[in-house]
Image (tube, rainbow, N blue to C red):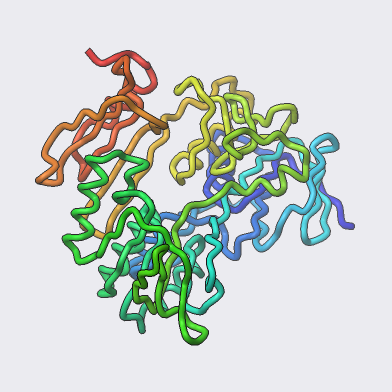
Amino acid sequence: MPERSVDVLLIGGGIASATAAITLRQEGFTGSVLLVGRELDPPYHRPPITKGYLQGSEAKDDMLVALPDDVEVMKRTSVLTLDVTARTATLSTKDTVTFEHALIATGAMVRRLELDGDSRDRIHYLRAPRNADALRADAQTTEAVVMIGGSYIGCETAASLTALGKPCTILMQESDPLDRHFGTTAARYVRSVLEDHGITVRGGVEVDALIGAGEAVEGVRLVGGEVIPADLVVLGVGAQPDVTLALKSGLPIGDLHGVRCDSHLRVKGASGIYAAGDMCEYDSVVHGRVLRVEHEEHAAAQGATVARVIMGSEEPHTEVPYFFSDLADWCALEYVGPAAAWEEEIVEGSVADGAFSVTYVDAERRVLGCLSVNGYGDLDGARARIASREPLG
């Protein structure tokens, strides 16, 4: 097998690896950098997949991340084995790569819902541009779309398809969309926005099967027997961290199902190995607890931290996670946190006017998270309060 050596091996073709490569060069790193990803495309931004790219207002080239010219990128390539002691990786190309540092940023895989009839035609999951391409093509001939799942993917996709003139129904187990993330006040507001634009929202229901007389889906049967007509179904029921390579390599997996890292994002017990992104479970000095975050902005921030640690920084990862979600051009949500649970929601502004913020605090009135709706509120101030852990006055 061909053998080669690099200074930094970036495993995974997403934003964490891309930002690590960019930061290394920005900080003056002159060593060799190899980015290996199984994606069909070079690193790109994922959020447009359910938004502008799905709607057709953004092209694939608009999503691409500009990497330094001297960073080597291998697309459609997987790391099959990783020897963390010998610091070697075997690629699907049969190459063997020796490295000094390696970042594992393999992201997450779509969580698949196992249902009767789930192999029928016109059933979609969204994770990559090609998924959006297939969904947009099928949507051209649809008359009834059912979206299963009321989280970010479900709400954003339903909004985008509705903006394209396709009637949508959202089915979900929780009472209101995004309730698990933002609580009752914000979730009911999001529901009102979706319903005001013609989307049917059904909370507190459970899907039993995807039915049809032929090969294509024709309806969604709920537990209890009710059938919701659908000639197109999209499933957005979450993702699970891709720790397949980490498990094969003997790396530690934590209670949050990610690769266990210290506060500097160094994999515990594996010198020279780091993790970032959806599958990184790290000791957060900001939150005082173990954290795993699934969002592009935080993955990028972690990639930058890893790059600086590789170059000798002793600063831990101190970024307060930031999230955003746009529902077509109807509503913009921005959030810093995350708050796993909270004692009280402090609402400021006007919910009725769609310009408000929700601050989530614990029993000691320490800020755990803050949601800004349509630009209202002080996210920078909330960030500072989350980091300081000082109670509100």
Picture layout, residue 134 above or below residue 157: below
Q: Residue at x 40, y 33 (%)?
A: 338
Residue most extreme to the right: 1
The image quadrant of residue 346 is top left
- The quarter of the rendered structure image containing the N terminus is bottom right
User: Residue 10 appears at what percent x and percent y?
Assistant: 66, 45
In the image: residue 69, left or right of residue 358: right
In this orientation, which residue lies closer to the viewer: 82 or 31? 82
Q: Residue at x 42, y 63 (%)?
A: 223
The image quadrant of residue 42 is bottom right
Picture layout, residue 346 above or below residue 116: above
Residue most extreme to the front: 224
Picture layout, residue 98 above or below residue 389: below
Picture layout, residue 162 above or below residue 344: below
In this orientation, which residue lies closer to the viewer: 306 or 248? 248
In the image: residue 291, left or right of residue 221: right
